[in-house]
Image: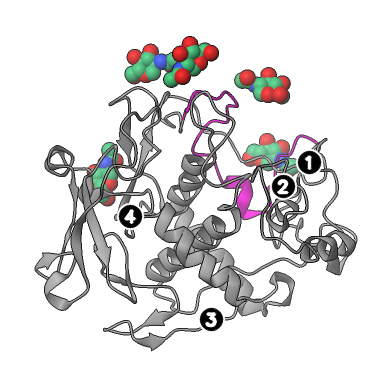
Amino acid sequence: MLLPCLSLSALLLLLFPAALEAQFPRVCTTPEALETRTCCPDWQGSRCGYRAGRGLCATYSLMSNAYIDYREDWPHAFYDSACRCNINFDGFDCSQCKPGFKGPHCNEIHSVVRKEITSLTAEEKSRFFTALEKAKRTNSEKYVILESNDTSIEGNYEFKNATVYDHYIWLHYYAAKPYRNSTRNAAHQGPAFPFWHRVFLLFIEREIRELTDDDSFFIPYWDWTKTNHCNICTNDYFGVSDEHGHIHNDSLFSEWKTMCTYDNDTLGKICISPTKTPLHPIIRNPGKDIATKLLPTVCDVRYTLAAEKFDTPPYDGGAKCSFRNRLEGF
Ligand SMILES: *[C@@H]1O[C@H](CO)[C@@H](O)[C@H](O)[C@H]1NC(C)=O
Ligand SMILES: *[C@@H]1O[C@H](CO)[C@@H](O)[C@H](O)[C@H]1NC(C)=O
Ligand SMILES: *[C@@H]1O[C@H](CO)[C@@H](O)[C@H](O)[C@H]1NC(C)=O
Ligand SMILES: *[C@@H]1O[C@H](CO)[C@@H](O)[C@H](O)[C@H]1NC(C)=O
Ligand SMILES: *[C@@H]1O[C@H](CO)[C@@H](O)[C@H](O)[C@H]1NC(C)=O
């Protein structure tokens, strides 16, 4: 796994300058922070924990002058300066440890093994779902979300509160919605796909660890090849859904509501305010999507792993012989 790891750091440097990672820390959305275009919060009395050797407030140079969508060229549409954390430190203020490290100096190895979801003990399973439920209900103190009906119009956005889990959903929206006048987006159908999603998982695991005070929390994986049906579409996992995709009342997910309305235009709409539109229950239709009726088979997995090149031109959903494109399912 040496190669993917190397590419990971290289790509992260390119895609996520500093630890800001295209999020909006609440402390950086004050009028003062936006006015001074600076997102360098204090940690233990100095910006970005500078005095403790954690990081420094760095200026980011502009990659291109004419932005057409303010999600591009992060963080430039909002900030000129943001924290750049030293090795092992992480977070918008360098207060956190990089994934894989812990301790007051972030120099102790922190290793957690992600287990297969149906192999969790009853206690682990209960802890997992209780943690998700808590994340879905608890307002995020650290982050806010940005809503916009058109991200190509300067200043056309509002910051809103969201729960810890909904912030996580929003991060995916922010990176998955196409840029204006484009079919491309930041996290899919391109080389960033595996790396972006790894960082995404690491991020939510860390948020939930903090929220639940459980350092060993992890998101399990699902080995769908164990059975020939959806063995987690049951009420003690993710819920049985009816023909309309509504989740059975016995599942805790029947109470879950979506935070952003679904829309499929390409105008760079990020999230339409939940206060302006009624909240909808989540819909799950496993196996009913016309385009992706079936889960990949073991044979598909082998075929994907057999690709020799990580990615190939034109580095999109049409790339041939590309590990990344096969992994994404195109
Ligand atoms: C987008 O939001 C702005 C500001 O709230 C509003 O003036 C405009 O009409 C909206 N445009 C669309 C297409 O909904
Ligand atoms: C948003 O969350 C913050 C922090 O919890 C809280 O102080 C504020 O009142 C909330 N704002 C709204 C509009 O709910
Ligand atoms: C986006 O496309 C619309 C319609 O095709 C066009 O009017 C507009 O000028 C384009 N905007 C940009 C920024 O390219
Ligand atoms: C779920 O509960 C609602 C009201 O609480 C009820 O109208 C509905 O019929 C129930 N659905 C099922 C599948 O039991
Ligand atoms: C979204 O796309 C689907 C399928 O392409 C289409 O049927 C539907 O009308 C679209 N919805 C909106 C709001 O444009």
State if disc 4 and disc 2 touch (CB < 8 Å): no
Which amino acid lies under the numbered mark 3 shown in the image of this protein? Val
Identity of the residue drawn at 59% across and 72% down: 3
Based on the displayed image, in which of its 4 quarters is residue 287 positioned? top right
* Mark 2 C-beta to ligand 4 under 8 Å: yes
Q: Which of marks 3 and 1 is nearer the N terminus?
A: 3
Please report contact status of discs 4 and 1: CB closer than 8 Å, yes or no: no
Q: Do the residues labelled 1 and 2 touch (CB within 8 Å)?
A: yes
Q: Dividing the picture into quarters, in which one does residue 115 lie?
A: bottom right
Q: Distance between the residues labelled 3 and 1?
A: 36 Å
Q: Name the residue under label 4.
A: 20
**Does the stretch in magenta take in 12?**
no
Q: What element carries label 2?
A: loop
Residue at numbered disc 1:
242
Q: Between tags 3 and 2, which lies in front?
A: 3
Q: Identify whether 247 is placed above or below 18.
A: above
- Residue 204 appears left or right of 322: left
Q: Is mark 4 within 8 Å of ligand 2?
A: no
